Image (tube, rainbow, N blue to C red):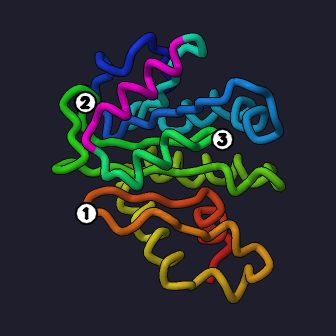
Amino acid sequence: MEWNVWSLKHVTRAHRDVIVILLAWNRFSNRVTDEIARHTTEFGHLMKYRGVLVMPYPERMQDALNEVLEKPWPEALSARIRTERYPFLLLIDADFEAFDPVTGRSAFVWFSDFRQNEEPIWQVFDAIGHRVEAGEDAIAYLTSVAEKARAGRFRARLAKLSKYVDVSIPLIPGVVSVNAGAVWADLLGD
């Protein structure tokens, strides 16, 4: 399911396992944003009733990003959110208003590493969407991908694509930060 909203403050999990929020400061068209836009409807449908893809209206996107930044994120993560020029996903497993990064669980998936190769974007959406639809814990899955990336498990296979597994945010309990390329590398197998 996908949901366009004016504000994130009223986004609730209800019966769903996860809320997936698509955010972007930059409204300029580029290959990454265009490819993401091509697949959002299918991604939302793929999660069925277990997840919802929340997309702020373009004219309200900056307000939504400010609502995200009002949460008590660690400074390194707040800085990344403020400076990211490509779309990214924020997954949470609580109502947005009640969500607290200090006590809750969340995951960020950054798409900036696909700026030279946007083709695998659909595969990242597919991997996350299928896990949500199957009732699996998508945040736990992304945590395992981040751990594999930090351990260098993808580097041997994708040495020339090391930018895909760069995980630059320090370890923060309950918060996962992973590049979309690491999800893609995980799909390719060890």
Tell me the amino acid under the disc marked 3.
Tyr
Which disc, if any, is residue 95? Answer: 2
Tell me the amino acid under the disc marked 2.
Asp
Tell me the amino acid under the disc marked 1.
Pro
- Residue 49 rendering spot, x and y as whole percentages: 40, 31
Q: Secondary structure at mark 2?
A: loop
| Residue at x 44%, y 22% (from the top left corner) | 64
- The overriding secondary structure of the stretch rendered in magenta is helix
Which disc, if any, is residue 173? Answer: 1
- Residue identifier under label 3: 86
- Residue 180 rendering spot, x and y as whole percentages: 61, 56
Q: How many marks?
A: 3
Give the Cα distance between marks 2 and 3: 25 Å
Segment colored magenta: 60-72
Q: Label 3 crowding class (10 Å Cα cut-off): few <14, some 14-19, many 20+?
A: many
| Residue at x 69%, y 24% (from the top left corner) | 27
Residue 138 in sight here: no
Task: Give whichever of 171, 108 is nearer the camera.
Answer: 171
Q: Is residue 63 above or below residue 160?
A: above
Q: Is residue 127 above or below residue 68?
A: below
Comparing marks 2 and 3, which lies closer to the viewer?
3
Q: Label 1 crowding class (10 Å Cα cut-off): few <14, some 14-19, many 20+?
A: few
N-terminal-most mark, 2 or 3: 3
- Residue 8 rendering spot, x and y as whole percentages: 36, 21
Q: Secondary structure at mark 3?
A: loop
Task: Give whichever of 110, 137 is nearer the camera.
Answer: 110
Asked if residue 48 is among those painted magenta in the image, a careful observer would answer no
Q: Quadrant of residue 94?
A: top left
